[in-house]
Amino acid sequence: MEPLLTAGIRQPNSFSLDTYVKRGGYQALKKSLGMTPDAVIDAVKASGLRGRGGAGFPTGLKWQFVDKKSPKPKYICCNADESEPGTFKDHLLMERNPHLLFEGCLIGCFAIAAKITYIYIRGEFWHVQEILEAELAKARAAGYLGKNIMGTGFDCEIYVHRGAGAYEAGEETALIESLEGKRAQPRLKPPFPAVEGLYGCPTAVNNVETLCNVPLIIERGADWFAKVGPEKNGGPKLFCVSGHVKKPGTFEAPMDVSLKDLIYDDKFAGGIRGGHKLKCVIPGGSSVPVLMPNEIDIPASFDAIAKAGSLLGSAGIIVMDETTCMVWAAENLLHFYRHESCGKCTPCREGAAWLHNILGKIERGDGQMKDLDLLLSISNNILGKTLCAFGDAAATPVLSTVKLFRAEYEAHIKEGKCTVPAPWRSSGARVGAAH
Amino acid sequence: MDYGRGRHKSARQLPEEGPAFVYTAERRAKLEDICTRYPTEQRKSAILAAIYLAQEQQGYLTRNAMRHVAEVIGCTPADVEDVVSFYTMFYTRPVGRHVLQVCRTLSCALMGAERVTEELTKVLGIKPGETDKAGEFTLLEVECLGACDRAPVVGVNDHWHECQAPDAARALVEGLRSKGAASLTGCHLKVEK
């Protein structure tokens, strides 16, 4: 299939307004503005577009839930706080194809009767923010943004809002809190953002890649979109492959592509580096369960990966070869969750730190056999007991690695040291101090 | 910032009082412009931008700076400190001219990020979380920067240095000393791969 989301992104000035308009850009917006807002929502619903941020919730439904009759203003918050370890697709889209995102935002605003989109971009995407600001100014000057867009009487603005370093800001209600000038901590749901979101107004929070798919649906039709890839998993998808592969990168494919091909095929990541063997794969960003080599010959779709016991999540595929110690990998991830836990819910705040301490002890060779049961018990006491999915995300790497690699944990404890010390790891004790 | 293993949170240093702080006219105007993006009664939405501007002006945040931010935004100093202490990109202590932020999360770690930190520690003679005596470099370990395909990634102030081989740490440090940001490889600087 020809690339659509990533069309022409390797060409010079792929990000500029001129290039985008030459490629037929903003025609979907023009078409949408000739439709009724309900017809736009119906098209997105019929296309079956599922959110690309992680949860895979149908975008059309999300928009339909926005209370259009409310007298309050409505908002779209574009979630560009891409922080899930192993995920870097939105970064690419914004860096190389920002107008596709703007067009998606504008169509979304038209559909839910919003006048403003805030693109909440993570603080560390310094250069991406500059590109967005510069291209927004060009779009505004060309009449694609602001008052009376394309002479249709539709007014809409897009603003970039820069975050300041918080993984939790990627959770939709935490994002809203952060946008309101507070700590990025999640809210109790319901009410969902569609009813009470930004400033207490009806709000749709959509991922960058999700919004980038909207112009394609309008331009080519919902039927076309639904037929790209497997049933209920339609549309082009970006996959981010990183870790021990020959050619790490972002690849566009329909979701009938197999997870195995994404890792091994020369069109994609090109196989495991240095003649090593595959040990395991995290298919959807660090928060999802690990898959073993014999489980990856499946379509990389939301439904197929869920059936295999994991999640497509944000499609951040992290590949590990046999030189990887799984206790170390779990400790590395729990350091992340410990550091990024927003601290609102006790099970997550205290649990992630506790899990990280125990994993560190086992990795250093100071573990005891009873620690394994303690790991499972703590993890099970975090699962489902927090306001947002972060708690589950923190417990998952532990539950999944203890289940699949228990022998490796036991070997660490018996031998009193790391049994798989790779040359690419630090030579001595861990260099960094805990945060 | 790094508070050290095993130390209770109550051992945290409070931000310094610092010298008197007022935004420069330019920065104040920039902030007022950013405030127009939000509904007038929601000025607090601009708090992150306001803190960034204060940090840009002074290098790090002091209590006086936070008080000024509070006045300008129209909230309490406690509100500002609440936000400052939550987000990782705000500094409450002086940092070096080059802040090296080594991504330590899984995809970068799999490609040797631990060794990058180790080499930088050797070359600079400082541990993660520290700044050298000359105030030239600060070394930090940070969590996923979102460029895992070009691992290991080192953030240098507001640029990315990508595909950093561990044994090139000395070259990175020397390049920054002689040529500044121009010595960085960040693919985004070229846009094309």
Image: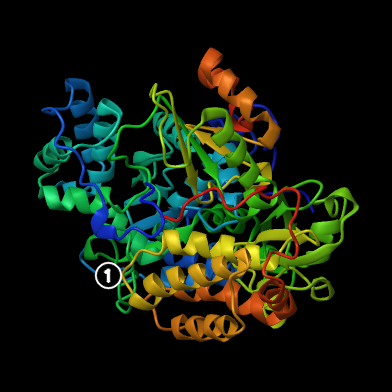
Instruction: Write the residue at 48% across / 34% down.
Output: B126
Image quarter hosting the N terminus of chain A:
bottom right
Name the spot of residue B7 as percent of width and height, x first. 34, 58
Question: Toward which corner of the image does residue A350 lie, by quadrant?
Answer: bottom left
Badge 1 marks a residue whose secondary structure is loop
Does the image show residue A305? yes
- In front of the other: A421 or B85: A421
- In front of the other: A108 or A401: A401
Name the spot of residue A114 as percent of width and height, x first. 33, 56
- In-image side of B32 versus A308 (left or right): left
- In front of the other: A294 or A329: A329
| Colour convention of the picture | rainbow
Instruction: Write the residue at 17% across / 27% down.
Output: B23
Name the spot of residue A367 as percent of width and height, x first. 59, 74
* Residue A130 position (above or below residue A255): above
- In-image side of A172 versus A305 (left or right): left
Instruction: Write the residue at 73% across / 73% down.
Output: A291
Does the image show residue A21? no
Residue beneath disc 1? A196
* Residue A259 position (above or below residue A232): above
Within 10 angstroms of label 1, few (less than 14), some, or many (20 or more) residues? some
Question: Toward which corner of the image does residue A14 lie, by quadrant?
Answer: top right
Image quarter hosting the C terminus of chain A:
bottom left
Question: Toward which corner of the image does residue A346 lie, by quadrant?
Answer: bottom left
Instruction: Write the residue at 67% across / 47% down.
Output: A427
* Mark 1 chain: A
How many numbered badges does the structure rendering display? 1
Name the spot of residue A337 as percent of width and height, x first. 48, 64
| Residue type at the position of mark 1 | Glu
